[in-house]
Image (cartoon, rainbow, N blue to C red):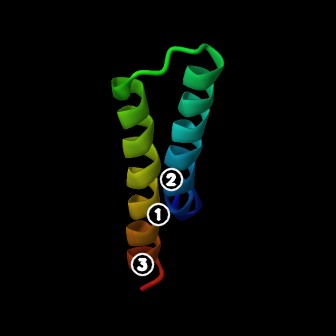
Amino acid sequence: MKELLKNLGLLIILGGVIFLGIVVFLEKQNNTHLAISLLLIAGGLISHIMINKYINK
């Protein structure tokens, strides 16, 4: 369970990158889609840092 939890942030980042790639590929770029991908990527980065900080203790 800890291994999955340690990789949760990376999975969220990967989801944001895939979502951004789909939006760009389909040429459906608007501020809402770009903001969602930004929130996923930034949230994944922050959660990855915070989760690994507390799991390693």
Residue contact between numbered discs 2 and 3, judged by CB atoms under 8 Å? no
Alpha-carbon neighbours of circle 3 within 10 Å: few (<14), some, or many (≥20)? Answer: few
Residue 34, x across and y down, in percent: 42, 32
Find disc 3 in the rendering and name its residue.
53
Q: In which quarter of the image is residue 40?
A: top left
| Tag 1 near tag 2, CB within 8 Å | yes
Q: What residue type is labelled 1?
A: His
**Residue drawn 65% across and 20% down?**
25
When the figure is inspected, residue 32 is found, relative to residue 57, above or below; the finding is above
- Location of mark 2 (residue): 8
Q: Please, what is the three-letter code of the amino acid marked with disc 3? A: Lys
Alpha-carbon span between mark 2 and mark 3: 13 Å
- Quarter where residue 10 is shown: bottom right
Q: Give the left or right position of residue 3, taking residue 30 as reference.
A: right
Identify the secondary structure beneath mark 2: helix
Residue 47: name its quadrant.
Answer: bottom left
Dot 2 or dot 3, earlier in sequence: 2
Residue nearest the viewer, comparing 54 with 10: 10
At 42% from the left and 86% from the top, the residue drawn is 57
Q: For label 2, count other residues whose C-alpha is less than 10 Å away and answer few (under 14), some (14-19) or many (20+).
A: some
* Image vertical order of residue 4 relative to residue 20, above or below: below
Q: Distance from label 1 to label 3 (Cα)?
A: 8 Å
The disc label shown at residue 48, or none:
1
Query: SS for tag 1?
Result: helix
